[in-house]
Image: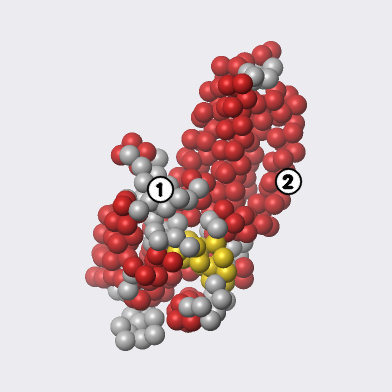
Amino acid sequence: MGKNMIKLAALLSALTVLFVLIGRAVGGTGGMVLAGMLAVALNFGAYWFSHRLVLAMARARELDPHELPWLHDMVSRLAQRAGLPMPKVYVIDSDTPNAFATGRSPSTGVVAVTTGITNMLTRDELAGVVAHELAHIKHRDTLLSAIVATFAGAITMIANIGQWALIFGGLSGDDEEGGGPLGGLLLLFVAPIAATMIQLGISRAREFQADAGGAHILGDPLPLASALEKLEWASQRVPMPASPATASLYIVNPLRGSSVLKLFSTHPPTAERVARLRALTGRGAGQPAIARGSSL
């Protein structure tokens, strides 16, 4: 818990500085002051409401317990195995199979899945995916993810506004106080990349940890390994129209990109994740596997 709070403080500081620098590039000293005020408000809002903003950006809706009762039962049973309170279950109306978790704490945890993932995966594979998302909640890193997604979205939006302002009217940065229009132009294009790099820095290690944690919760790493292979295959063929700001939240990257863009992917290579999961079979996942004939 202490390490997460230190990471959170460092993350908010880095994103706030980046936010203020963009404000200066767009509006000079006045823009910097305004961006600073917005950053303070965003810090507060991101801590308390980022998970709601993420769900809104993903166009997720809360699932009625009567709509997919077997899915609620699956999440409930796995949450009990993980020692977590029952999270809310949300669904995203998309044919692309994917999933993510969010929430400020385990008591406000949310597991969101696409309609495509419920149709494509077997029940065992979907249980592996849900266990992975519950591991994110248990490790308390969903808050970090939601805050990064919120800030990344805001940074990208302001940078886009600044780029259009440059095209139609020029930047208003104060030459004597900074790098002038050229420096502002560079910052406006670099800032979204910097936000992505911050996401990358905290996302890759978390995915490996959640994979191992999910295997431990389920008691068997192989269903998750199989699910990841299917999800990677599907994401390359039917990319999801997700916001780049929220891409790091999903179990696999929902955005299809070139080999160059993959260097900046917030997710580790799926093949490496699968290899690590399969290596766990030789050591045991930590709990008895759930029977194939169960309601999962």
In this rendering, is residue 163 above or below 227? Answer: above
Residue 150 at x, y = what percent?
59, 48
Mark 1: which secondary structure?
A: loop
> What residue appears at the point 28 percent right and 66 percent down from the top-left corner?
226
- Distance from disc 2 to disc 1, alpha carbons, whole Å, reads 30 Å
Residue 124 can be seen in this image? yes
Q: Nearer the viewer, mark 2 or mark 1?
A: 1
In this rendering, position of residue 136 left or right of residue 239: right
Q: Quadrant of the N terminus?
A: bottom right
> What residue appears at the point 32 percent right and 74 percent down from the top-left corner?
122
Residue 121 position by quadrant: bottom left
Residue 123 at x, y = what percent?
35, 76
Residue 291 position by quadrant: bottom left
Residue 144 can be seen in this image? no
Q: Residues within 10 Å of mark 1 (few under 14, many from 20)?
A: some
Q: Which is more N-terminal, label 1 or label 2?
A: 2
At label 2, the amino acid type is Ala
- Name the disc covering residue 255, or none: 1
> What residue appears at the point 60 percent right and 44 percent down from the top-left corner?
151
Mark 2: which secondary structure?
A: helix
Residue 145 at x, y = what percent?
53, 53
For label 2, the residue is 41
At label 1, the amino acid type is Leu
